[in-house]
Amino acid sequence: MSHQPSGPRCAALVGSYTCGKTTLFEDLLFAAGAIDRRGAVKDGNTVGDAAPEARARAMSTELSVASFDYLGEPWALIDCPGSVELTYEAQCAMMVADLVVVVAEPLPERAVTLSPILRFLDDRNIPHLVYVNKMDLPEATVRGTFEALQAISGRPLVLREIPIRDGAGKVTGMVDLVSERAWRWNPHKPSDLVALPDTLAEASGEARTGMLEALADFDDALMAELLEDAVPSTDEIYANLTRDLQKDLIVPVFFGSAENENGIRRLLKALRHEAPGAEVTADRLGIATAGTMAQVFKTVYAGQSGKISLARIWSGEVKDGIGLGQDRVGSVLSLMGRRTAPRGVARAGEVVALSRMAGAATGDLLTESGVVEADWPAPLAPLHALAIRAEKQSDDVKLSAALARLAEEDPSLAAAHQPETSELVLSGQGEMQLQIALARMRNEYGLAVTAGKPAIPYRETITRPATIHARHKKQSGGHGEFADVHLEIRPQPRGAGFAFDERITGGVVPKSYFPAVEKGVQSYLGKGPLGHRVVDVAVTLTDGSYHTVDSSDMAFQKAAQKGMAEAMPGCGPVLLEPVLTVAISVPSEFTPKVQRIVTGRRGQLLGFDAKDGWPGWDEVQALIPQGEMDGLIVEIRSQSLGVGTYTCRFDHLQELSGREAEKILAEQA
């Protein structure tokens, strides 16, 4: 197989958090000679998962980049976090990769966990292949996993190998369908070339024919050869595989066991021979490379080093001190996990860290003349939230700065003050992501933070009309205060809001005081008799009196407030809760479980339909009270192998009564 060396290339490893990506990442680096010793996740000494939060949880909590040379060619590997709560970080890495390796578990029922990843890759036309890991498991199946993945992939999968099994059914090696050679695996050692087992000759031939037929769908010349029973050359097959992969027409499938270092060199060989170059990727992204261009795909605050921007160089050279975007590069650094080393200059295709880029943000396409607009995925909408506060009031400013940095590092995190509840709310993709953020505030910023469930913005309204006569009078020497008002209060239809009117005749209350009366009424409605903002109320000023010397705007405001406070408790106040329209997306097999979740949260099912563009998925529509939304994403994911999600928006306010209302009012007391 011929190979034309190319410039620096980049591959990203993605998959669910249980698939073994970090072990595969370590294997590839070891096989390429980038590291001298192979670490283990359980020992906490791998290149990836080097953050304290990652090692405490034995899972990736941030992406890791490793740059190295393999057979004289420069490479960058990106190990992406597998948790669905950290999806945005993986998406950013996939955007700049030339090729994505989707790491799958060898169990058909787990294939669905890769649906969001495959959908993103298909939508973005990103070349990708599948590596089925953990083939050392007794229940591992290549064919079953292949078929399950094909059901959720928008591209045809092409099996590149078939397994060799021993008498007990254990996978001991593989047959390469292109070269038609067989290999016997040796744990932690290179594989041995062996004769093709006679028992696999027929199966190998059938699988090879299936591979060729899949390729012929994109090559008329190959199709003609197959129809004439001609045997295409090995070079021709490799050329078709490479071209179709680079155009994202097919998804090759390999397999192995990262734990035992099986299939690693075969995967590394495929990356080297078949991954497109940086210029192809830039063209796919619509980047017209000219001059010097670099794109930031991750922002990191690294202790005393300050802000670090991880970037892919698309064209030109980036040197220490060069002006890029809004800043001047402090230094160009190479990456090996969390370790950095100065390198001074980087060329097109390389992945490096740029220091002191204060104005650069994730997704920015930087040039010497400024920041150029570029296509980039938007941060995902928040699904889980915590109300947080610093344990020490003196740390409030420090907390705001820490949150700003965390949101810059992970744009799917957001923090905002809620004026109505006076809370600082941190929101993100799930409970684990927020707990990681809290741990980082503690470990990196020395901040002790308390967290709890955010308050629900309940409202209240009235069910009965009332009239009230209120007078404000105060005399303490000199000018006094005097205002006299007659108010008529009545309920409005739901959603009508607040209305103020007057029916004053004869000038008993001058027009100049009408705005003051309205202001006083609205001031009271900010917190009604049940403790919440009052809505859907109409108030009319019907009568009153004033004093030419002692009356004032403030006096009429106070009189109106007093009248409302006296009248409202007798107007039949009721609590209103916000209700959201929720669209829950899950694989179809989990739809009944989701329906039970909805009804268990006082929700109203509106129906469900097949999710557009997502084979095998449903979208369940429902109305759910906002007070029942806490932890919803956690429950949905626990019932859908971690892949379920939802979107929501405010729909209406509805009256809350009985035990639920009593419970809420008791909690507020």
Image (tube, helix red, strand yellow):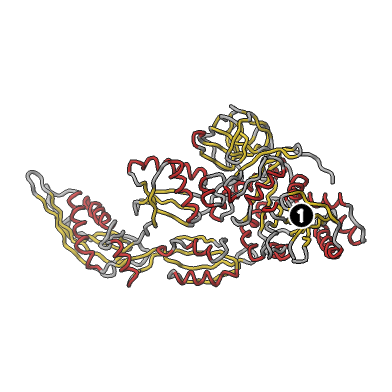
Frontmost residue, 652 versus 410: 410
- Element carrying mark 1: strand
- Classify 10 Å Cα crowding around label 1: few (below 14), some (14-19), many (20 and above): many
* Quarter of image, res 322: top right
Frontmost residue, 62 versus 4: 62
The C terminus: image quadrant: bottom left
Image position, residue 236 (x, y; %):
86, 51
Taking the spot 55% from the left edge, 72% from the top edge, the residue there is 592
Image position, residue 367 (x, y; %):
61, 34
Residue 156 seen in this snapshot: yes
Image position, residue 115 (x, y; %):
63, 60
Taking the spot 63% from the left edge, 35% from the top edge, the residue there is 334
Q: Is residue 584 above or below residue 93?
A: below
Taking the spot 65% from the left edge, 65% from the top edge, the residue there is 615
Left or right of residue 388, residue 514 in this image: left
**What residue sits right under mark 1 in the picture?**
185
Amino acid type at mark 1 = Trp
Left or right of residue 644, residue 141 in this image: right
Residue 246 seen in this snapshot: no
Q: Is residue 160 above or below residue 657?
A: above
Which residue sits furthest top? 321
Which residue sits furthest left? 477
* Quarter of image, res 501: bottom left
Left or right of residue 326, residue 189 in this image: right
* Quarter of image, res 352: top right
Frontmost residue, 328 versus 53: 53
Image position, residue 448 (x, y; %):
39, 46
